Image (cartoon, helix red, strand yellow):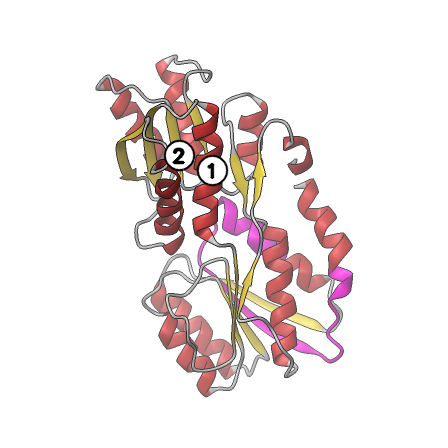
Amino acid sequence: MKRFSVFLLSTALMVNAAAAVTIGTTMSKKDAFVSILTDNIRDAASKTSGVTLDLVVANMDKETQINQVKTFIENDVDAIIVNAVADEHSELMQKMAAEANIPLVYVNRQPPQSRFPGPVSVVSCNELVAGRLQMRMMANEVGGKGNVVILNGALSHPAAKARTVGAKEVLAQYPGLSIVHEQTANWSRDEAEKIITGLLDKGVKIDIIAANNDEMAIGAVRAIEKAGLSFEDVMIGGVDATPAAIAEMEAGKIKVTVLQNAAAQGLQSIKNAIAMAQGGYAQEFDWIPWEVVVPSNMENYK
């Protein structure tokens, strides 16, 4: 968490709401990454003079999130930040905000739409790139040969789809690598452990486990540990660079993860919400770069 704090201390001073701004924020859930993102949104808002943050959690319920947005509109907030529960209700939230003339910022999860009825900014990372970076590192490490297992996040989530597509784009360049199994573990450590344990029990040889997030990568670590296999023989990669994943990397169990910079996403979502609330400009698709984390540079991400 040290790196996130340093980033915020050095950059939050650049955000300044000249007039009072109230930002309603609805987060999808409280999992490992979204909790870090939520903390960074709170931190960025608290370090910005004149900003009042009304932050709630939808607990993965679409109707709850729609009602939270309705409440923000009724309370006449100046801007709304949404970490969406799902794609299906994104268009409705856009319409509601546009009709109320309130700018909307999506953070982390991209909406399926590319054109919007009102002022919208999407602050996220290009998910295709995460899958490409992760798989490229692992493919090179194993010499371009071996059996690959892909652990997908929730199939309804655009990040899971795009990260897997990115990984497969790289695999297509390595004829010596074969996907022996692909399955959704729904971002879950426990589900990932069960999947990998089941494959090992069947005698499936695995050289690479590419997980769409760190929690599933940690689940794979648990399965490999319980099977008594060496982490020199099975390469495990995740996405997010959570503190728990960095700890597993330090122990020699996860070989690569890709930082989805929660501090940068949190800060930029606050900056864009303020800019639009005050009638200014915010980039419609505001991409935050990924950062590859491996044992040689992991000290920078603790």
Residue at image coords 43%, 29%:
139
The C terminus sits in image quarter: top right
User: Are there few (<14), some (14-19), or many (20+) residues within 10 Å of tag 1?
Assistant: many
Residue 77 appearing in the image: yes
Residue mark closest to the camera, 2 vs 1 = 1
Q: Earlier in the sequence, mark 2 or mark 1?
A: 1
The residue nearer to you, when weighing 117 against 42, is 117
Determine the secondary structure under disc 1: helix
Task: Name which quarter of the figure residue 10 lies in.
Answer: bottom right
The N terminus sits in image quarter: top right
Horizontally, residue 21 falls left or right of residue 54, namely right
Horizontally, residue 17 falls left or right of residue 258, namely right
Residue at image coords 36%, 36%:
171
Distance from Cα at disc 2 to Cα at disc 1: 8 Å
Look at mark 2 in the image and give the residue it sits on: 210
Q: Which mark is residue 27?
A: none
Q: Where is residue 170 in the image (x, y as percent from the top left)?
A: 39, 39
Q: Residue 134 carries which label?
A: 1
Determine the secondary structure under disc 2: strand
Horizontally, residue 203 falls left or right of residue 253, namely left
Q: Where is residue 95 in the image (x, y as percent from the top left)?
A: 40, 81
User: Are there few (<14), some (14-19), or many (20+) residues within 10 Å of tag 2?
Assistant: many
Q: Confirm whether the magenta stretch covers residue 34.
A: yes
Q: Confirm whether the magenta stretch covers residue 132.
A: no
Residue 238 appearing in the image: no
Start-end of magenta stretch: 12-40
Q: Where is residue 152 in the image (x, y as percent from the top left)?
A: 34, 42
Task: Name which quarter of the figure residue 250 lies in.
Answer: top right
Do labels 2 and 1 touch, CB within 8 Å? yes
